[in-house]
Image (tube, rainbow, N blue to C red):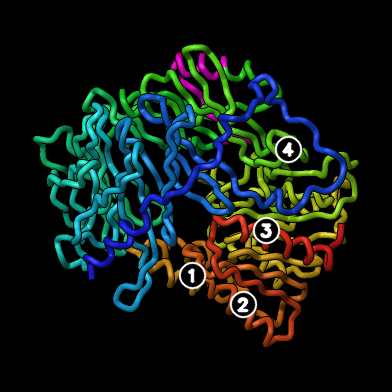
Amino acid sequence: MLKKWCLFAAAAAVAVAATCPPVGAQEKASAASATPAPVAPGKIDTAVFAELPMLESPEVSPDGKRFAGQLAVQGKQYFAVVSFDGQSKQLIATGETDLNWWRWVNDEWLVIGIGRTMPVEGDEWYITRAVGVNANTGKTVMLNTPDTGQNGARLIWTAQDGTPRILLAAQTSIYSNEPGFWPKVDQVDVSTGKHRRLLDGREGVMDWYADAAGTVRMGIGRSEDGRNRRLLYRPDARSDFRVVDRARGIHDSLLVPSLFLPDPGKALVVQDDDKGFSALWEFDLATMQTGKQIFAAPGYDISGPVVDPVRSTLLGVEVTENRSTTHWTDPAMAALQKNLSAKVQAAQVEITSFNTDHSVAIVRVGDATAPGAYFVYRAADDTLDPLAMNNQTLKLRRLHPVKTIHYKARDGLDIAAVLTLPRGSAGKNLPLILMPHGGPSARDEEEWDWWSQFLADRGYAVIKPNYRGSTGFGTPFLQKAEGQWGLAMQDDLNDAVKALADQGIADPKRVCIVGGSYGGYAAFRAAQRDGKLFRCAVSFAGVSDLGRMVAYDSQFLGGGAGKDWMKAQAPDFKAVSPLYHPEEFSTPILIVHGKKDRRVPFKQSKLMAERLQAAGKPFEFIEQPEGDHHFTRGEDRLSFLKALEAFLAKYNPA
């Protein structure tokens, strides 16, 4: 059985003989013309908003001659490796398999991580594998051995000397009572798939970490249920691992280094300050003591450090305030950012990837009102040239204005929310869409959002609250969600409607709630609990039964800790699970769910629809046969938007 599991990766990663469409390099626009132009009066066709981003997460090769990323071709996404001069193009089709990550190893080879749900001993398991990809030919090499178990794609290091070497951690058994259940670490030649054992598995340790030189320095061990955790550390390859920190329960955390510094006894860690906001600190690994603070963003958590993979040095720190930005601590990177920002007026400029010597960089240009584009910067001639438009129809045009507002929840808690208003409107007495984000451990920010922009284009104001439990606003704010799923978290959403009505922005009699994932749960809950406030509700991939969701997640290793966390958020699952209260639904609801959703099972929506039908409640249910949790197909995006538009026109017309 184990041998069969590894075969899907080889089959899924076959290069397809397809001609790659132009990847933006043929665009004749100059960087100076990157200021988005106003859109013509009238509505934009629904299909325009449903377009897949042409290019996602491009990564520059070490020599700066190519980039790799996810490319949209005829409404589907492929892994692509493309030379900047357009002479070399490779497309890799993954079929039914998820493409989870990719990394350059040297100028010729990359490694990608893929995953797929497969039946294992009567259950559905998510299996991961690693595959080598040749940038010149598209050739793929399976990097896992035939005995690899469930998890086989934990990349912990890539060589920086030009050789095609990586360190890969993988299981060789699915049974926790066998040694192979705990991942070993092998050095793997990406070009041949040959392995050399570097470190045997150790009981309890699922995650290994290496320093810039390729020495495995750290491991995180945990009990099988995930409730107890420990941090193992060694200063060099000759030393034994020792336990340097322990954690227990949902509130206790390990002090895990984010970056090993050149000094073997020093590191950088992300840790809360005395007000509960995460910051970056120096850390002494010998004494396990925190040193001076390197960076903090008052009032916000940091997202994490930006590290130079070659030199193992800190380049900057990512943080999301009203929007995501990188504060460059490295003088050269700060100078580059200043230079690039000066080249593009009235738009945000973000450095997303760069080559080894930083002479070539990929830059994202745009803001929350425009889908934006990727540009390539070359230091040799100080030029910024177009690479790919995120939306081929809209290009760099600005649509509807976006801003962050604040309001008070009924208990006085300050809530930040992202507001989108129809362009050209007076911003008064508008029909409103309340759109809670998924997660709920996530947050909304000022960024391009095709849902919000589509709805604003149809005449709606859209409010996206960062309700209690959202990330980025400090640990105390996060912990205020405990015990409050479907309760105070739901109140925070309703209070956004009141705040906008009090300001005259929204008509409180014309409000609909629309959300996906946890946002879909919130839509279910609103239709069940607070139907009098909403004319309709829309749930995409929503959770209707918390108990079933916990049971699904408990199949994974560490599920006990996840169950503990969920019980802390909602002590009584049935009381706040809409599935058990269909008779209380008092507003029409549209339910949309993809059958191939691996994050929230399709059954969560199907059961809810069946209960509503039995209760005689008004609902519409759309099954997307090929749909997943992340709208990776243009066809599914379009069908959702069309259904959403028709549903709103029926129950909450603008």
Q: Is residue 560 visible?
A: no
Q: Nearer the viewer, mark 3 or mark 1?
A: 3
Residue, x 51% and y 14% (percent of image)? 335
544 relative to 349, above or below:
below
Q: In this view, does 435 lie to the left or right of 600?
A: right
Give the camera-side residue of 365 and 441.
365
Q: Name the residue under label 4.
A: 403
Q: Do the residues labelled 2 and 3 touch (CB within 8 Å)?
A: no
Q: Mark 1 points at which residue?
A: 549
Q: Are marks 2 and 1 in contact (CB under 8 Å)?
A: no
Distance from Cα at disc 4 to Cα at disc 1 = 34 Å
Q: Is 211 covered by the magenta stretch?
A: no
Q: Are marks 4 and 3 in contact (CB under 8 Å)?
A: no
Indicate which disc, 4 or 3, sits on the residue closer to the N terminus: 4
Quadrant location of the C terminus in the rendered image: bottom right
Distance from Cα at disc 3 to Cα at disc 1 = 28 Å
Indicate which disc, 2 or 4, sits on the residue closer to the N terminus: 4
Quadrant location of the N terminus in the rendered image: bottom left
Q: Mark 3 points at which residue?
A: 638
